[in-house]
Image (spheres, grey):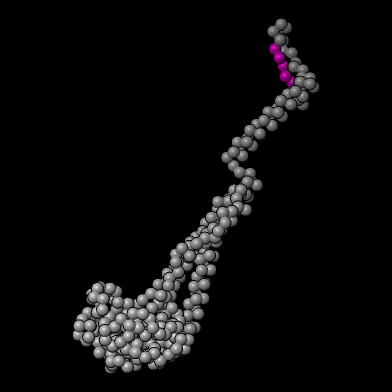
Amino acid sequence: MAKVKYRYNPETLNYDVITVTAKERLIKWGIMVAASVVVSLIYFAVYSYFHDTPKELTLNNKLSDIKFNYQMLMQELSYIDHLLSDVQKRDDDIYRVVLESDPIPASMRQAGFGGANRYQSLEGYINSSMMIAANRHTDRIIKQLYVQSLSYDELIFKVLNREQMNQSRPALLPVSIRQIRNIYGFGWRSRHPVHGDSRMHWGIDFSAVTGTEIFATGDGTVVSTGWGGGFGNRVIIDHGFGYRTLYAHMHRISVVEGSEVKRGDIIGTVGNTGTSTAPHLHYEVLKNGRNINPIFYFYYDLSPDEYVQLLEQSQNDNFFEEEW
């Protein structure tokens, strides 16, 4: 039973029954519904501001997973960078030194991929910066691994040809130690015996009597014979692997251009030709076109004591005064 509501009537001093029409009821109900909708919208707006919707929660969770995976990926790439740097250092400082190969230039190892728009397809996304950074880092590692693989290919080839390289490397005295009278070493010459000035001496001189046999110091191919100006009669042998040897002031040449020689083969005899004041052999070792002190390559047929004696003699600066 509906409640009956009354209103006080001051004119009659009585309480009159309040009668509500259907229209008034409808208006009142409409106001309540409208107010409820407004309150609900306000509540939803406030809640949405401070809380994510289920769809947003899902997307945010996926984004968090992506960022976490990106961080893990970058950590793995940094770890790979560290390992690769260690491999490169070993390659340059150990493997290539042992196998007598020049280190790979850092500019070649660190070179990136060309093309300014290589990552253009990754631009325009929310996480473009992350994707581009990861791809750039990965590409750099791939390039360095490729360079390292080429380095190992080269070193493997040298290892497989190690025996041939050992036979080819100059390692023998070009003149028998029993036939050597005196030695003048590699380095700055205080006085040239002919020109009288100071100049660099790019080889080692072995004083010996005319006709003393001269030996090839390693396997190789004779690439030049004959007169060589101040060198007089001279022979040049290409041993491969970047090595060449030169034998100058010879009396007689026993090989011809293009002939193959083995270590210990006789290639001629000591003489006094060219810019020379007494019989001797001028001997040079070149590696990749650069002169190297031959004293470091006399290890094939010398005892430690003989090598020390030879080293001391090579440092004598009075070679010409004593013997010539």
Indicate the position of residue 259 as horizontal and vertical percent values.
47, 89
The answer to whether 91 appears left or right of 293 in the picture is: right
Task: Please check the rendered image and state whether residue 70 is part of the magenta-colored stretch, yes or no.
Answer: no
User: Where residue 201 sits: x, y (%)?
Assistant: 30, 77
Looking at the picture, does residue 286 appear above or below residue 269? above
Write the residue at 62% across / 36% down. 45
Please give the range of residues in magenta: 3-8
Report the residue that reaches farthest toward the top: 11
Question: Which residue is at 66% across, 34% downward?
Answer: 41
User: Residue 124 versus residue 178: which sits nearer the camera?
Assistant: 178
> Disc count in the image?
0
**Which residue is more in the foreground, 147 or 199?**
199
Position of residue 38 relative to residue 113, above or below, is: above
Quadrant location, the C terminus? bottom left
Q: Position of residue 68 (x, y in %)?
A: 54, 55
Vertical placement of residue 251 versus 4, above or below: below
Image quadrant containing the N terminus = top right
Answer yes or no: is residue 239 visible.
no
As drawn, 64 above or below 216: above
Q: Residue at x 60, y 36 (%)?
A: 46
Q: Is residue 6 magenta?
A: yes
Q: Residue at x 43, y 83 (%)?
A: 224
Q: Nearer the viewer, residue 73 or 95?
A: 95
Determine which quarter of the picture holds residue 275. bottom left
Specify whether 33 is left or right of 297. right
Please state the horizontal and vertical placement of residue 306, each as a whole percent of the image: 27, 89
Q: Relative to 55, is 187 on the left or the right?
A: left
Whether residue 108 is visible, yes or no, is yes
Given residues 150 and 275, the one toward you in this image is 275
